[in-house]
Image: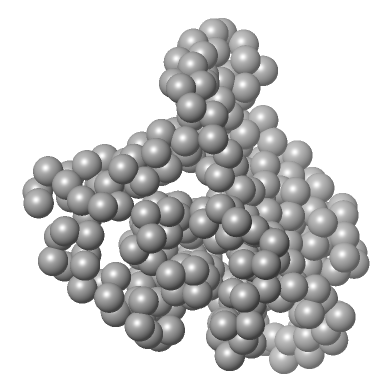
Amino acid sequence: MYQILTSFIIYITIFLFGMTVMKTGFKNISETGIKKLLYHMTDHPIKGLIVGTLSTALLQSSSLVTVIVISLTMTGLLQFRQTIGIILGANIGTTVTGLIATFDIGELKFILLAFGIFLIFLPFQRTFVIGTVLFGIGCIFISMDGFNKLAEPLQSVEVINNILLMVNHSIGASLLFGALFSTLCQSSSATILIAMGFINHGSLALDSAICIMIGANIGTCTTALIACIDSTSAARWTAYTHTLFNLFGAILFVPFISLFTSFILTFVSEPDSQLAYSSIIFNIITALLALPFANLYGQWVERRLKPI
């Protein structure tokens, strides 16, 4: 049991470390550029949606993009209404990781890892960034392979088996598990990859995995909520909006989980791809539904913002 749990922790660590290295590489060259992009290209919610999606896909972290937006709001470089489109896009951008994990590249993942490490240690900024990306992608595939291999042994652990039984029979338990695990490891992508491992093994139903994914979206908001402590009213509302948007998305979709699951099953055959595409479609639909109300909501909040 301890060996299985230790291996599980190691694979989570590999994934999170790989994502941290990738984000560090991009952050070194792009954070300033992204701040300028967010400042100049968010005068309309649609522009904000596009910028938020691309920025999050680049930085591989909706939490990081949200924290950057909060910092810009605190300094007055962004108005609250400009942040709404970015927040909507951030959820879409973060689905890239899950999509990457569905590809089967075999032993190439070790080549990506080794070549990435080689490029990281070269004394050039461009090769450093390319190296961090290759290293991060290699870590995604290695951790995904590990989660697939550990799915069956983990199910033999009584605690894990009980959790799987609960999430397979309760929408509430699925949402709660996704939210708590995402909060714990500060990564909705890691939560989704673990769910992919179980769904590939057949120990997790697709509808339960989708609920875990939706819960993970909520759990990842904790980073922004922590970042806005002792900040301006506008910055706090940016974090609140991120949380409220994900909560309302969950409330909107949960009644239609069975219908949504049936829809996904009609055109995607591979279990992990089913979850990856569910995440993409869910986040795109919720963002597009919220987009027409972005300006009205922004104006309503700004009229009520009072300095504290």
Query: Residue at point 87% right, 65% down?
Result: 46
Q: Is residue 109 left or right of residue 50?
A: left
Taking the view exactly as shown, the residue that stands out farthest to the top is 123
The reply to whether residue 75 is visible in this rendering is no
Query: Residue at point 63% right, 82% down?
Result: 259
Residue 238 vs 119, above or below: the answer is below
Taking the view exactly as shown, the residue that stands out farthest to the left is 2
**Which quadrant holds residue 134?**
top right
Q: Is residue 63 left or right of residue 113?
A: right
Q: 189 or 185, which is in the foreground?
A: 189
List x then y, in percent, for residue 29. Answer: 67, 30
Q: How many marks?
A: 0
Residue 121 vs 13, above or below: the answer is above
Q: 265 or 230, which is in the foreground?
A: 265
Residue 299 vs 83, above or below: the answer is below
Query: Residue at point 77% right, 79% down?
Result: 290
List x then y, in percent, for residue 74. Answer: 64, 64
Quadrant containing the C terminus is bottom right
Q: 300 or 59, which is in the foreground?
A: 59
Q: Is residue 222 left or right of residue 30?
A: left
Q: Name the colouring of the figure.
A: one colour
List x then y, in percent, for residue 233. Answer: 62, 78
Q: 58 or 153, which is in the foreground?
A: 153
**Which quadrant holds residue 246?**
bottom right
Query: Residue at point 62% right, 22% down?
Result: 130
List x then y, in percent, for residue 164. Answer: 29, 70
The reply to whether residue 10 is visible in this rendering is yes
